[in-house]
C-alpha cells in the first residue's frame, strides 16, 4: 500500500510545482560562480569585492534568470546589465550586491527602492530585510515585476507604479533607501523619508554621462553626510506621471 501511494504523491507534487519555481543545477552553479568570481573577488581598477555574508547569500539565492526574458537566460549570471524592455535594464550583479552592502541593512529593517525594473534588486533586498517597498514609473514594468515577485513568493515586497522622486510617504521613515536610476540631484523628499542613522545609495549625474554612486547617511540632527563610492552608468531617473506606454522597446 505504501509503495503504491508514494509515486502518486510524488507525481502530484511534481505537477503542482510551477515552472518558475524550478531552479536547474546549471543555474545554481552559475550563481555560485558569479558570487565567487564577479562579486566576492576584488576586481579591476581597484574595485573591491563584496564581503557581507547576508548579501552574498542573497545573490546565491535569487534566481536572476527569472527576471530576464527567456532569450537572455543564458547570460543571466554574467556580470553585465541586460535589457528588460521599455528601454530599461536590470543592473549588473556586482553593482546590485555592492549597493545592497552599502545600505548596511538588517533582518528587521524596512527599505524603499526607487526603480523596480525587473524586481531583481527588490528580491535581493527581500532576502535580507523584513519589508521592501518599491516604486516603478513605467507601469507595465511595475505590473510584470509585481506578478513575478508574487510567483516567486516574495511576499514581503510591495510594488507600486509612480514617480519615485517623491518616495512613498505612507510607509516612511525607512531604514534604507536605494535608487537604481541616475538622478540629476539627490531628491529632498527621499532624504526626509530616511530614519536618522539610515543610509541612502543613489547614482547621481547626467543621463548617460559621468555618474557617481553616492552613499548618504542621515545624521541624528537631520543633516546628511555623503561620499562618492565609484563611477557608474545607470538609466536616468525620469520625472512625472507613471508611463503607461504598452510598447516594449
Ligand atoms: N532595480 C531594477 C533595475 C533598474 S533600471 C532591477 O533590479 O531590475 C531603473 C528603473 O528605474 C527603470 O525601470 C526605470 O523605468 C525606473 N525609473 C526611472 N525613473 C523613475 C522614477 N522617477 N520613479 C520610479 N522609477 C523610475
Image (cartoon, helix red, strand yellow):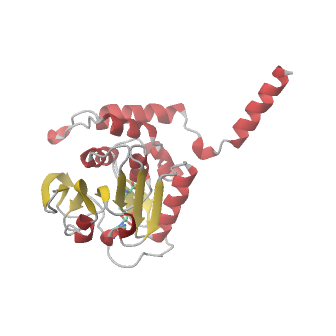
Q: Along the line of sight, which residue is nearer the eye, 249 or 121? A: 121
Residue 186 coordinates in the image, percent (x, y) = 20, 66
Residue 113 coordinates in the image, percent (x, y) = 35, 59
Q: Is residue 42 left or right of residue 30?
A: left
Q: What residue sits 43% from the left and 75% below the top?
A: 243
Residue 249 visible in the snapshot: no
Question: Residue reaching furthest front?
Answer: 221
Q: Along the line of sight, which residue is nearer the eye, 87 or 111? A: 111
Residue 195 coordinates in the image, percent (x, y) = 26, 58
Residue 215 coordinates in the image, percent (x, y) = 19, 54
Question: Residue reaching furthest right?
Answer: 1
- In which quadrant of the rendered view does residue 93 lie? top left
**Ligand 1 lies in quarter:** bottom left
Q: What residue sits 38% from the left and 58% below the top?
A: 89
- In which quadrant of the rendered view does residue 223 lie? bottom left
Q: Give the vertical position of 34 relative to 208 (above or below).
A: above
Q: Along the line of sight, which residue is nearer the eye, 141 or 248? A: 141
Amino acid at each position: 500500500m505504501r509503495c503504491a501511494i508514494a509515486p502518486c504523491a510524488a507525481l502530484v507534487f511534481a505537477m503542482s510545482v510551477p515552472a518558475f519555481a524550478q531552479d536547474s543545477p546549471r543555474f545554481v552553479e552559475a550563481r555560485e560562480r558569479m558570487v565567487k568570481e564577479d562579486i566576492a573577488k576584488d576586481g579591476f581598477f581597484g574595485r573591491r569585492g563584496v564581503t557581507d555574508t547576508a548579501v552574498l547569500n542573497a545573490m546565491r539565492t535569487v534566481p536572476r534568470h527569472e527576471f530576464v526574458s527567456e532569450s537572455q537566460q543564458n547570460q543571466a549570471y554574467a556580470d553585465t546589465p541586460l535589457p528588460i524592455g521599455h528601454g530599461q535594464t536590470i543592473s549588473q550583479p556586482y553593482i546590485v550586491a555592492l549597493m545592497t552592502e552599502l545600505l548596511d541593512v538588517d533582518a528587521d529593517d524596512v527599505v524603499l527602492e526607487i526603480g523596480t525594473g525587473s524586481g531583481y534588486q527588490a528580491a535581493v533586498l527581500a532576502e535580507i530585510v523584513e519589508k521592501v517597498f518599491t516604486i516603478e514609473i513605467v507601469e507595465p514594468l511595475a505590473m510584470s515585476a509585481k506578478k513575478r515577485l508574487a510567483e516567486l513568493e516574495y511576499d514581503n515586497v510591495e510594488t507600486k507604479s509612480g514617480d519615485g522622486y517623491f518616495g512613498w510617504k505612507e510607509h516612511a521613515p525607512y531604514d534604507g533607501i536605494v535608487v537604481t536610476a541616475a538622478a540629476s540631484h539627490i531628491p529632498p523628499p527621499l532624504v526626509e523619508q530616511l530614519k536618522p542613522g539610515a543610509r541612502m545609495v543613489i547614482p547621481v549625474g547626467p543621463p548617460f554621462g559621468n555618474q557617481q554612486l553616492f552613499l548618504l547617511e542621515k545624521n541624528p540632527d537631520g543633516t546628511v553626510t555623503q561620499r562618492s563610492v565609484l563611477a557608474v552608468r545607470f538609466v536616468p531617473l525620469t520625472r512625472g506621471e507613471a508611463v503607461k506606454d504598452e510598447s516594449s522597446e
